Amino acid sequence: MNAKKRALGKGLSALLNDSGMEAEPVYDAEKELLAVGTIGLVPLDNIEANPYQPRTDFDEEGLKELAASIKEQGVIQPVTLRKDDNGKLQLISGERRCKASRMVGLTDIPAYIVKADDHAMLEMAIVENIQRENLNPIEVALGYKQLISDYSLTQEMLSERLGKSRSSIANFLRLLNLPGEIQIGLRQELISMGHARALVGIEDVQTQLDIFHDILAQGLSVRDVEEIVKNLSEPKKENRKKPGPDHSENEQFIKVQKELSEIYGAKVQLKAKSGGKGSIVINFSSGEDLERILNLINK
């Protein structure tokens, strides 16, 4: 197994083997029997949604692309179902395949049925989605949180069970401390996991939101945000050693930056370097905006 595969954690097959689950006979739509040891077609109408599905966001464009593929080639990989105590079939993994199959008018889908309790069902759904990279970071974090709270697991226990490092699980869980607006931005891929991890390091909520808005408005990179966070923490250390002069210089710095922003009607950043050197960055939103700013500079 190569390093990339190890990083993905355990697959469904590993979870099935580890937990001692056995394959149930698979539904045969024509005979209305469960054919032992085979993968058969199951009517889509007989499949109930997974109550433990960690994913809440479904990309409509991605579903259409999957539907087109299914229409052309059929469903290549069976969905995974469990049979509950009442004989009903509940979806463990493959909700996108079910949705896309319905979009192209299919009535049946190939399925594999296993025995699984609620705990295993949630765990398998999370792992399947993570391995396919279909969950956004907030959905992953919520799934981890649910496993920890519902089954009294520690982060270390969850790490061993899912084949993920404890630090990785901790990083996801920390995302849930971010303000709701930033979590939504992460869900909608307006910012990356790297941006979010940098923002988590800021204690003040309003400062987190201000930088989040700057990321959206200015297209700041992860490195830019990390530098901003670093600069926010460094003055605190300096101020303890030299409270008077440093505080005054910072205030003047912010004042000049604000005045320049008002003059040019755009976001202006002053970046100071050692030796009194630095740079001025004026952001523009379009070619017309750039021309306007240049006219102001040349006056």
Image (tube, rainbow, N blue to C red):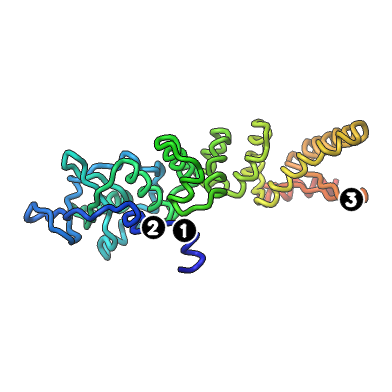
Q: What residue type is labelled 3?
A: Ser
Q: Where is residue 141 in the image (x, y as percent from the top left)?
A: 49, 42
Quadrant that contains the N terminus = bottom left
Question: 289 or 276: which is nearer to us?
Answer: 276
Horizontally, residue 116 falls left or right of residue 137, namely left
Q: Distance between the residues labelled 3 and 2?
A: 51 Å
Mark 1 = which residue? Answer: 8
Mark 2: give few (<14), some (14-19) or many (20+) Cα within 10 Å: some
Circle 1 — which element? loop
At 75% across and 44% down in the image, what residue appears?
A: 230
At 65% across and 45% down in the image, what residue appears?
A: 198
Q: Distance between the residues labelled 1 and 3?
A: 43 Å
Q: What residue type is labelled 2?
A: Gly
Q: Is residue 223 above or below residue 261?
A: below
The numbered mark at residue 11 is: 2
At 65% across and 36% down in the image, what residue appears?
A: 208
Q: Position of residue 129 (x, y in %)?
A: 40, 51
Q: Where is residue 67 in the image (x, y as percent from the top left)?
A: 30, 56
Q: Where is residue 238 in the image (x, y as percent from the top left)?
A: 86, 38
Q: Which of marks 1 and 3 is in front?
A: 1
- Looking at the image, which residue sits at the far left? 31
